[in-house]
């Protein structure tokens, strides 16, 4: 993939021109319709009330405060795959509700389906422009443009990139199963992508990239995780009604296929997975360098030692490379009734019993320092 002089991706021939529905769009549509039927069966999410703060192509910013709050601001950054309500799935396993109960003002960057004009949206949009729009809207409401960021999976990757590009805007960074170091010796997806054709071969015939394709790739890359462990977890949850309810809600969420903008797909595959530009310090976004050493905010990373999708090896090198002196790692051991263990740290019963209280204590300790930790700026 070539960069232009400003450091942004040059527009590839054909990118954004092929806007006909892909051959997998009917599969996406069928899965979304299946999700509607599951909703009617009472298996859907039970989301918290929210109001829309900002709406633009590709993004809706939600706020969940039932009343004005003076507490720290948490901005949740979901992965740009499937729908963001995995953060607010059911009342007893809702990160949004845990934040509200802890006295936080909770915002969520809700990624929307990219339209025709969104096919050129890349890392420069998702990791910087959209994030700046969110922080700017929060600043208008709250009077402060400095926030705590929490991101899961590729959402954590986007949050880390923003923290490197705009360290003055981030008070703390909470990364949950977020891949930041890539390579064929890191995880199963990395190994599979290393052998796959260039991303442009796909985006030349499919724009946007169908969610069903992304799900299918994951399944082919790691059937052990996406089939066998998933089935085993379903069987184990049969004797526990609460675990079974969560399991079925996650399965319903998995039907909510979300296509990915073509440019974003290309840049994630080529710049991150294949070339590991962020960790190597060679990633340019908007003409500026983005590298771990530019992250100055306190960093808390959550890793699952048993995860094959984002193993600790994909996270810990970033912890050692950041410019902050305030870093910590929490380990998550898994749950029953979460379907996909990769999302267990968001929706698992054990995660909400032990992990999230620790995360909230960590966040409030940094918030009570009255600003960015001075040691992290050394």
Image (cartoon, helix red, strand yellow):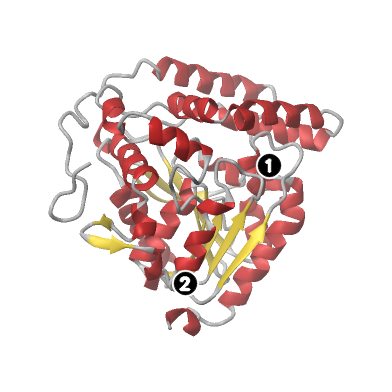
Whether residue 303 can be seen here: yes
Q: Nearer the viewer, residue 105 or 196?
A: 196
Read off the residue under disc 2.
Answer: 297
Work out whether residue 344 or residue 64 is closer to the camera in this orientation and state it.
344
Indicate the quadrant containing the C terminus: top left, top right, bottom left or bottom right: bottom left
Pointer 1: residues within 10 angstroms few (<14), some, or many (20+)?
many
**Residue at x 17%, y 28% (from the top left corner):** 14
Residue 219 position by quadrant: top right
Residue at image mark 1: 90
Q: Residue furthest right?
A: 239
Q: Which residue is found at the position 45% from the left and 32% from the top? A: 258
Q: Nearer the viewer, mark 1 or mark 2?
A: 2
Kind of element beneath mark 1: loop
Of the 4 image quadrants, the one containing the N terminus is top left
- Classify residue 196 by image quadrant: top left
Instruction: Say which label, 1 or 2, has the lower sequence index.
Output: 1
Decide which of 171, 289 is in the foreground and name it.
289
Residue 116 at what x, y percent from top left?
Answer: 26, 31
């Amino acid at each position: 993939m070539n960069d232009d002089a400003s450091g942004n991706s040059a527009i590839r021939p054909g990118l954004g021109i092929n806007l006909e529905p892909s051959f997998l769009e009917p599969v996406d549509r069928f899965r979304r319709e299946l999700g509607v039927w599951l909703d009617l069966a009472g298996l859907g999410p039970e989301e918290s009330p929210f109001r829309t703060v900002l709406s633009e192509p590709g993004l809706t910013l939600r706020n969940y405060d039932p009343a004005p709050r003076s507490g720290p601001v948490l901005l949740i950054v979901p992965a740009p795959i499937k729908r963001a309500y995995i953060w607010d799935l059911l009342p007893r396993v809702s990160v949004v509700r845990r934040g509200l109960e802890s006295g936080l003002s909770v915002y969520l960057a809700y990624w929307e389906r990219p339209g025709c004009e969104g096919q050129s949206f890349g890392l420069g949009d998702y990791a910087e422009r959209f994030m700046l729009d969110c922080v700017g809207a929060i600043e208008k409401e709250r009077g402060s443009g400095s926030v705590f960021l929490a991101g899961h999976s590729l959402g954590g990757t986007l949050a880390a990139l923003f923290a490197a590009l705009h360290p003055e805007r981030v008070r703390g960074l909470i990364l949950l199963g977020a891949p930041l170091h890539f390579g064929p010796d890191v995880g199963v997806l990395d190994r599979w992508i290393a052998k796959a054709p260039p991303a442009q071969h796909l985006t030349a015939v499919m724009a946007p990239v169908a969610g069903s394709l992304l799900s299918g790739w994951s399944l082919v890359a790691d059937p052990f995780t996406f089939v066998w462990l998933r089935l085993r977890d379903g069987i184990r949850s049969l004797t526990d009604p609460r675990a079974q309810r969560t399991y079925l809600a996650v399965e319903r969420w998995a039907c909510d296929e979300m296509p990915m903008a073509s440019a974003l797909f290309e840049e994630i595959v080529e710049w991150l997975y294949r070339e590991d530009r962020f960790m190597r310090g060679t990633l340019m976004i908007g003409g500026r360098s983005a590298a771990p050493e530019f992250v100055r905010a306190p960093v808390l990373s959550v890793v699952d030692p048993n995860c094959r999708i984002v193993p600790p090896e994909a996270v810990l090198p970033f912890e050692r490379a950041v410019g902050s002196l305030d870093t910590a790692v929490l380990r998550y051991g898994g749950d029953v009734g979460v379907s996909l263990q990769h999302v267990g740290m968001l929706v698992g019963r054990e995660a909400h019993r032990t992990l999230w209280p620790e995360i909230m204590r960590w966040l409030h300790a940094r918030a009570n320092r009255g600003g960015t930790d001075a040691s992290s700026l050394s």
